[in-house]
Each structure stands twice: as C-alpha cells, then as structure tokens.
Image (cartoon, rainbow, N blue to C red):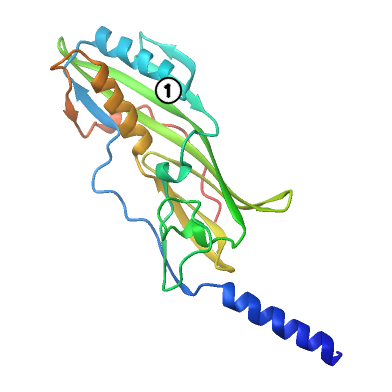
Amino acid sequence: MSKTLAATLIASSSLLGGCVASGIYQPPQAPQTLDYSREVNANFDTAWTTITNVAGATFFNIKNFDKGSGLMTLEYDNIRGNVGAYVNCGEFASSQASSKTSHPNPKSVINYMSINDIEMHLSGRANVMARPVSDSKTMVQVNSEYFLTVTKRIGDKTHKLGEWHFSSREPDTQTADVSYKPTQVTCQSSNKLENDFLTEVGARLPAGNVGTSQPAPDSVIAPVTKKKSRK
C-alpha cells in the first residue's frame, strides 16, 4: 500500500470517527396506560354518526364500515405532519448531539441512524369499534396498525435504514444501524393517533356528552392482525 493511499484511508477514518456519536440505545418504556378506548356519554347512534364524521374529516380513508357490528376500518398513507410524533423508537443516550433531527425528540434513536438526510414514512390502518354500554353510553375503541419506514437520502437516491410493523398494543423490534453499529431497535405507538381520534369524537358530541378513558376488555376490542417481528 502506498504512503499516499494509507494517509488517505487514515484521514477518512478519522473524519468518519469524528462524525460517529458514541452512546447507549435505550428502548421505549411501556406506557403506563394505553389510551385507545374511551366511554362516551352518548347513545350508539349518536356515537356512530360522530365517529363517521370524524373519520371523514381527518387524514383517514374509510375502507369499510358496518354499523350493525359497530366496526369501521380506516386506512392512511404518508401521514401528514411530523411522523415522529406518532411513533416512539426509544432514545440514544449520548453526549454528542445528532447531526439530524428528523424526529421531534432530539434524543430519538432515529436521529442517530445516519448523518445524511433522514426521512420517515408512516402508513397503516385502524379498526374503530363502537359498542353500546347502555342506552346513554357507548364504548369507542381504536386499535391501529403501523408501517414505519426510515430512509436516508444521498443525492437523488434513497436508501432504507429500517422498517417496523407494530400496533397500538404491540411493539416491533428490528435490527438497524445506530451510529454505524447494528442495534436491535424497538418501535411502538405513542398513542397520539388513537388519543387524537377519540378526543375529536368527544369534542364533536353535544355538550356534556364527553366520557372518560376506560380500560376496555380484550374481548370487545377488534385487534389488527400483525405479522411476527423479524429478528
């Protein structure tokens, strides 16, 4: 190896080393409560009409619905706004700041996956279930499925950094490079999508009809089928 080539490699290595942040990956904590169900003070017909209005006024596309069963399936693609607000993939504890802040949390591990421009794409679907509890109360539940893809852009080319498939209640763990080291990264819902939908339903009900969050029994939740994690 020539002295010139060796010097170039050493310089490149030093430059790269200066860009690599050292730290420890910290997976997201399991939420204390899962806010994907809420009991509202409204009869079933009123609640169902309100759910339909909310779904039609947001970024969701109504795929199908059946008032008889109280089930509505919604889809979304390339969600508007900051994708990072809807997902939590943990943090990277480091004394060095990330070079990119694609995720609103500066410490998010996603920001440490590349020194290039990072992009997040979030799509999925949600099952909304409405079940009458009494003549004047209805339980409304939202169980969402998420497909998160993280990419980096170099020039006019896009390279995939990682892909996660999780739901409102079940996280997903995949291998992704974090500060140039293969790391098992866990991503889960922040419950913002579910909470925002339920909050909007409550806001559109007649005054005095907003209910409270309730831990709904698993038997009445319409789960979204999720593929097994790829380890």
Instruction: Name the side, left or right, on which 81 lies relative to 121.
Output: left
Question: Which of these two is toward me, 50 or 45?
Answer: 50
Query: Please, is residue 150 above or below residue 60 in the view?
Result: below
Q: Quadrant of residue 5?
A: bottom right
Question: Looking at the image, how many numbered discs can be counted on the residues?
Answer: 1
**Kind of residue sitting beneath label 1:** Thr
Residue 87 drawn at (x, y percent)? 42, 45
Residue at x 64%, y 82% (from the top left corner): 14
Quick one: quadrant of the N terminus? Answer: bottom right
- Residue situated furthest bottom in the rendering: 3
Residue at x 55%, y 34% (from the top left corner): 78
Instruction: Name the side, left or right, on which 201 lies relative to 103.
Output: left
Quick one: quadrant of the C terminus? Answer: bottom right
Query: Please, is residue 223 above or below residue 47 in the view?
Result: below
Instruction: Name the side, left or right, on which 172 lies relative to 11.
Output: left
What residue did someone put label 1 on?
A: 58
Residue 230 drawn at (x, y percent)? 56, 51
Query: Please, is residue 97 above or below residue 135 in the view?
Result: below
For numbered disc 1, what is the local secondary structure?
loop
